[in-house]
Amino acid sequence: MRIAVVTPIRLFSEGLTSSFQNHAEFAVEAAVSDLAGLRAALETGRVNVILIDVTQGIDLDEVRVIASEHADIALVALGLNEDRRDVVRCGRAGFSGYISRNASFDELCRALSDVASGRLACSAEISGGLLRALFCMERQTDTIDADQGLTRRESEVLKLIGQGMSNKEIARDLNLSLATVKHHVHHVLQKLGLPRRAQAMRRVREAPWIASSAPALDRRRELDGH
């Protein structure tokens, strides 16, 4: 198992790297202090598990983008407070598993093996909470109005936002000016009632159909003479 460790604490990073050296089944390919360093490390293509220290706070929206771009790599949250809400947030960000703050190094190794095998080891309380969270999320997304009032172009912009594209990338992809893209992004956020771009990205990934409803809306407007 080829691991990348992400933690801003150098002593912690060196300690983990040293501990893994006594286990032949694990190899630390990279140890970096932040997500920017992780992106550079992933360019080598030699990592299949990413261990991210979440005790110091982490940008889960950025983690979600990395998880989307590297779907073949398992992300594991290290030092997670074993609370249902925190576990659910990490799951939505793309983490495949987590290591609680009270776990020993041996438990860390077992958890990594579980993740590599596609298993999630967690307490009965957490597993029950995850099932309830899935039910609540399904009920919530079922109530999302597919007709958000987006135009066809706004729908295209929203879809690309969901893919993690920047305004410049969207402008290039749709052959639009940067100012026009900014205008569309502003209206998309306004119509969805969202204050931040990252929230729009999260919304369209959780409910992708909201970015495909606009063509039907445009046709209805044409039939109505608008």
Image (cartoon, rainbow, N blue to C red):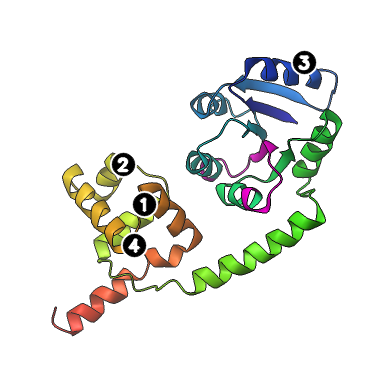
Q: Nearer the viewer, mark 4 or mark 1?
A: 4
- For the record, the magenta segment spans 68-86
- Where, by quadrant of the figure, is residue 126 drawn? bottom right
Residue type at mark 4 is Leu
Residue occupying image coordinates x 80% and y 48%: 121
Circle nearer the N terminus (1, 3): 3
Q: CA distance from mark 1 to mark 3?
A: 42 Å
Callout 3 environment at 10 Å: few (<14), some (14 to 19), or many (20+)?
few
**SS for dot 3:** helix
Labelled pair 1, 2 in contact (Cβ < 8 Å): yes
Name the residue tied to disc 3: 18
**Labelled disc at residue 192:** 4
Name the residue tied to disc 1: 160
The quarter in which the N terminus is drawn is: top right
Circle nearer the N terminus (3, 2): 3
Residue occupying image coordinates x 20% and y 43%: 178
Name the residue tied to disc 2: 169
Q: CA distance from mark 3 to mark 4?
A: 48 Å
Circle nearer the N terminus (3, 4): 3
Residue type at mark 2 is Glu
